[in-house]
Image (cartoon, helix red, strand yellow):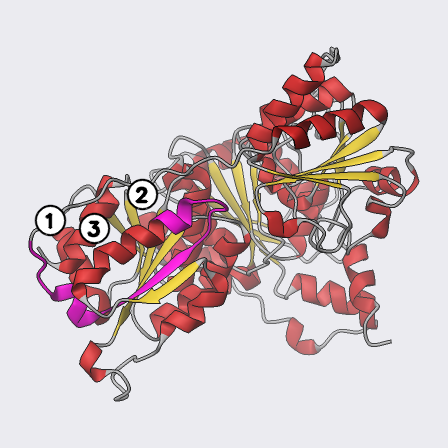
Amino acid sequence: MKAARTVLEYLKNSGVQYIFGIPAGSVNAFFDELNDMSELTPIVTKHEGAASYMAAAYAKYSNHLSVCIGCSGPGGTNLVTGAANAMREHLPVLFLTGAVPVNTNGLNASQELDAEPIFRPVTKYSVTVKESKDLLKEIVRATEIALSGVPGPVHIAIPIDIQHETISHVEIPAPPKRTAIVPEIDTIKNVAEELLARRSGYILVGQGVKNSVEQLLELAEILNWPIITTPQAKGYIPEDHPLLVGVFGFAGHEAASELIADGDGQVLLIVGSSLGETATNNYNLNLTKNRFSIQMDFDQTVFNRKYEIDLPVLGDINVSLLLLIEELRANGLAKTPFKVKENKEIYKEVTGEYNTKNVLLTIQKYLPASTRYAIDIGEFMSYVIHHMKVVDYDTFNINVHFGAMGSGIGSAIGSKLAEPERPVACITGDGCFFMHGMEILTAKEYNLPILFIVMNNARLGMVYHGHALQFKRTHPSFEQHPINISAMASAMDIPSFQVTELQDLHHDMLHHLMNLNGPAVLEVVLTDNNTPPMGDRVKFLSSFGK
């Protein structure tokens, strides 16, 4: 059995279904073996960077190891951004890169690059395999590392000759299983005591709550405390929950900021947030000022980074919440009965003006409530965070913390492959589209019904508005000649519709585009000169260079 085949057999037995990437000479053994393995489907993309975003989103929404592959040299370096993104989001992605034959190292071979040290800062583990007998062992070790403790990406570079060597007497190991991180019970008791001693507080929810929303809401209802989410956690707490105040941080809500600045809550309970820049309104000191701070996370490195935490709780979020709820109940606390807010007027903000806010709210009004929105990076992102509604669980994938333009396009594809029955729409911009927009062709080739909504303003909108606010001027290069993106889609035989006024958006058209046997493009031609809700970000940037 070829060494490459042993890897694929192990991944197949581990439940891997897709391998994202681009075939090339230095990984040809893997792609050749896939001819005989119908259980593994290669998702051949148009760019390795997009493949890495697909793999990350697939890991996120399948709760499973994901695999991404690229050639030596440029293929590997194209994957690095996606590895950094997966590292930031704690996603278990196995990155495989080809490498030149062992005996040509240092001889300036075609596409030669020592990828191991390049990947090391953005993965949990990075290694180059030098002998075929070590390949499967390293794959097993890497996947165990990817899934254990705080999950994250790993990288293995595999020389061409190693891939093709024959391995005899191969025994495929059992796949690894992650062991939950259980918090110390004394720590949970201390948290309960502090909460009982201080009967008022706020709950700040980060994206780490992803698989623990039910427990989080139960805890909030027991405490009867307001819930504030970070931008990355938008989509987890439903809009109609009476304890939800709104988003705090980048493009957040005034009510949340006022509560943090002027509220009399004695405790800040932080659940699943690393308290980074975009989550804290540029490291706003009011968050923990004169408050007892409790932070729950499975990553001990997030404690006491920028904010001094009075009581850190190390453990998986769902386990920590379940134990805390049990402890509070044992002390006589019970859930407060709540009546959900009326949802029938949830889109009452829509007016007749043709602007970004009204376009996004109108689109959401007509799309299925369960639609997951993969949000790219641009001025539209601030409108999504600030104005779009959370009407179903886990409906937004917002990557504002790493902020890679074009990542939303690949993320939409990874999300759709992970949950095929869930409607998926990508909200992207023309700038992002020109980076990774050709992946709509990948969606077509795999018959993935995804609606790609392209906000086309013929400029780098976030940069344009940021400079206008910070410097009171913009560089002419931020704007460009308008491009007909619908025509580009048509050239690829992908259905499209171009919007030039609010009245163009209606149920029948959107329903049609969402229910095809493949992707569709909705191009929104709109130059919105309203100031996006991102003022605090500009204030932060403006603090430099004075």
Asked if residue 99 lies left or right of residue 453, the reply is: left
Occupied quadrant, residue 472:
bottom right
Tell me the residue that label 2 is attached to.
447
> Along the polypeptide, which appears first: circle 2 or circle 1?
1
Q: CA distance from mark 3 to mark 2?
A: 25 Å
* Stretch in magenta: 144-168
Tell me: residue 364, above or below residue 124.
Answer: above
Q: Position of residue 131 (x, y in %)?
A: 19, 68
Occupied quadrant, residue 137:
bottom left
Q: Is residue 244 visible?
A: yes
- In-front residue for pair 160/253: 160
- In-front residue for pair 434/527: 434
- Identify the secondary structure beneath mark 3: helix
- In-front residue for pair 242/46: 242
Tell me the residue that label 3 is attached to.
8
Does residue 473 belong to the magenta stretch? no
